[in-house]
Image (cartoon, rainbow, N blue to C red):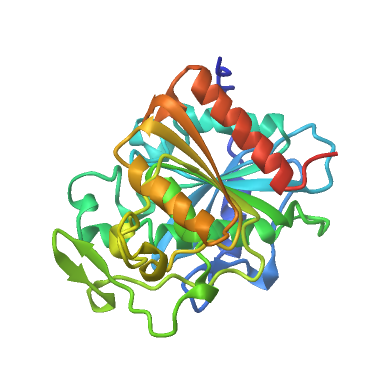
């Protein structure tokens, strides 16, 4: 049985504006980095919303900070929403996350984890991934292959540089995970792509309805993997085809040689049996397994797309397994 979400914690607007200012110096790759290498918040901070700049867009990040844990520094998890966005009633102005994400926020609080819930849509004028936002070239603006991964890395950099006013680090920089659902799961996979393994002559393209788009059309190459990247990722019911971004079709005969996708950190796949996206993700899992990448899979019989929303045993089991996975990978066991 799922827990009932707690009431939304007070947003500390003073901290909000401080962090906006501290995140005003852009790096060459278009992601904001904290000024002087750090962003500072008081130890009394409750949940708050900060902005990171990715390209020309200001991306809201809802930070959830646990209280009463008695920790000097915390693990953290970056959360990537699905196609319906992150906010209750699609309204970012109220700062209220949807029920699903409030439940995860409370779960993080229970386990003394800082959460960074990344809104890839509202800062780009998008409410949901529907209509024109599902087809090229409009969908490049919120691409889960090469834009939302930049959002995730911006949140990673923020967490790694987040400090209290006394200079102590709030987050252990090497103990940060990433979790995503549906389109956000696809973004998780893209974020964990090991750019060190990209062939030297690789050309970044995507195919939609038989038409190929390249970098001159707005397709971007992935940014280089961070020096200290994510420790692990969890992938809930996303797609793995990438519109041929990674090369040969993942379920095709030339996948082992023609598809370049690899990961630099362990990934857990939480996959429903009844979902049109499951086939290509199972193919991706099998290919990564054959290549020796650190992947694990749980398949939920009878479950469908979006089963994390469901109030049933499979949803609860998947959440339990997710937290156990992060507990190991983020060095939370005592």
Q: Quadrant of the N terminus?
A: top right
Q: Is residue 264 left or right of residue 235?
A: right
Query: Residue 141: in sight, yes or no?
Result: yes
Q: Quadrant of residue 145?
A: bottom left
The x, y position of residue 53, in whole percent, is: 47, 63
Identity of the residue furthest to the bottom in this view: 201
Going 82% across and 56% down the picture, which residue do you hit?
168
Residue 244, picture quadrant: bottom left
Left or right of 64 in this view: 212: left
- x%, y% of residue 273? 39, 31
Q: Is residue 108 above or below residue 56?
A: above
Task: Tell which of 192 and 302 is nearer to you.
Answer: 302
Looking at the image, residue 98 sits to the left or right of residue 245; the answer is right
Residue at the image point whose x is 36% and y is 70% from the top: 258
Q: Nearer the viewer, residue 302 or 17?
A: 302
Q: Where residue 56 appears, x then y in whole percent?
A: 39, 67
- Between 87 and 284, the one nearer to me in the picture: 284
Q: Residue at x 57, y 30 (%)?
A: 319
Q: What is the quadrant of residue 309 in the picture?
A: top left
């Amino acid at each position: 049985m799922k827990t009932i979400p707690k009431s939304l914690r007070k947003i500390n607007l003073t901290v909000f504006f401080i962090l906006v200012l501290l995140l005003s110096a852009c790096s060459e790759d278009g992601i904001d980095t904290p000024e002087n290498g750090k962003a500072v918040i008081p130890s009394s901070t409750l949940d708050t919303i900060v902005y990171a700049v990715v390209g020309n867009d200001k991306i809201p990040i809802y930070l959830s900070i646990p209280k009463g844990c008695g920790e000097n520094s915390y693990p953290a998890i970056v959360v990537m929403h699905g196609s319906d966005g992150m906010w209750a009633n699609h309204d970012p102005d109220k700062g209220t996350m949807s029920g699903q994400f409030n439940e995860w926020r409370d779960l993080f609080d229970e386990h003394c984890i800082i959460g960074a819930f990344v809104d890839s849509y509202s800062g780009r004028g998008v409410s949901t991934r529907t209509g024109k936002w599902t087809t090229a070239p409009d969908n490049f603006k919120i691409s889960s292959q090469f834009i939302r991964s930049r959002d995730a890395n911006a949140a990673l950099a923020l967490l790694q540089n987040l400090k209290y006013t006394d200079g102590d680090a709030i987050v252990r920089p090497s103990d940060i995970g990433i979790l995503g659902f549906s389109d956000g799961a696809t973004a998780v996979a893209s974020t964990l792509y090991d750019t060190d393994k990209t062939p030297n002559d690789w050309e970044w393209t995507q195919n939609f309805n038989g038409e190929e788009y390249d970098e001159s059309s707005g397709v971007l190459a992935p940014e280089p993997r961070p020096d200290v990247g994510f420790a692990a990722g969890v992938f809930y019911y996303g797609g793995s085809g990438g519109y041929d971004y990674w090369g040969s079709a993942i379920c095709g005969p030339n996948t082992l040689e023609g598809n370049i996708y690899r990961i630099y950190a362990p990934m857990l796949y939480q996959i429903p049996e009844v979902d049109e996206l499951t086939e290509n993700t199972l193919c991706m899992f099998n290919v990564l397994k054959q290549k020796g990448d650190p992947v694990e899979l749980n398949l939920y019989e009878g479950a469908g797309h979006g089963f994390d929303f469901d109030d049933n045993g499979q949803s609860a089991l998947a959440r339990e397994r997710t937290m156990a996975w992060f507990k190991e990978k983020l060095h939370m066991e005592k």
